[in-house]
Amino acid sequence: MLTSKEAFNKLPQKLHNFFIKYPPRPFQQYKSSPSVTNDPTLNPFFPNKNLETGNWQQPKYSRRRSADLFKLAKKFGLQDLLPPTPRKFHEEKYNNVKFMNSIINPSPRPDLDKIHEKMAKRANAIENMDDIISKARPNYKKLISKRKKKEEEWF
């Protein structure tokens, strides 16, 4: 049977070095969001703000490197010991899927009676459009009379 030290030494070099710099979760807690640079619970996977300068520092481990570490730790079953990462992986990613609202709450089908009423109102409005416009613009009557003359003289 392996002791914990022997098992730790058998980890891949990347994971081994990471756990030396940032001890696993039971020994040290990490924030699950960006924090300040002098915070003792600083998470190496999130950007951090320097209060003196007001600038944001890049995370110690980029998203690609954090993904590589997570996948490597998952192979050995140690993913729970890593600090929280900004990315979601595997089961966590697919368990938190939000379904589209239209699938869960489909909109009701419109009643055909209402559609026919609406179409009849539109047709009526189009037929009476000249009268409606001529009430608003008195000069429009001249345009209507010119249009009628052109229609009558086609032969």
Image: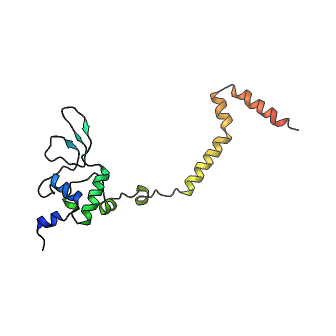
Compared to 155, does 27 lie above or below? Answer: below
Residue at coordinates 11% horizontally, 56% vertically from top-left?
A: 27
Snapshot quadrant of residue 37 = top left
Is residue 19 visible in this depiction of the protein? yes
- Foreground of the two, 3 or 112: 3
Residue sitting at the far top: 139
Residue 31 position within the rendered picture, expressed as x and y whole percent measured from the top left: 19, 49
Residue sitting at the far bottom: 1
Residue 140 position within the rendered picture, expressed as x and y whole percent measured from the top left: 69, 28
- Foreground of the two, 7 or 151: 7
Residue 142 vs residue 121: left or right? right
Q: How is the image coloured?
A: rainbow
Residue at coordinates 17% horizontally, 56% vertically from top-left?
A: 19
Residue at coordinates 25% horizontally, 38% vertically from top-left?
A: 56
Residue 21 vs residue 138: left or right? left
Compared to 6, does 117 lie above or below? Answer: above
Residue 139 position within the rendered picture, expressed as x and y whole percent measured from the top left: 69, 25
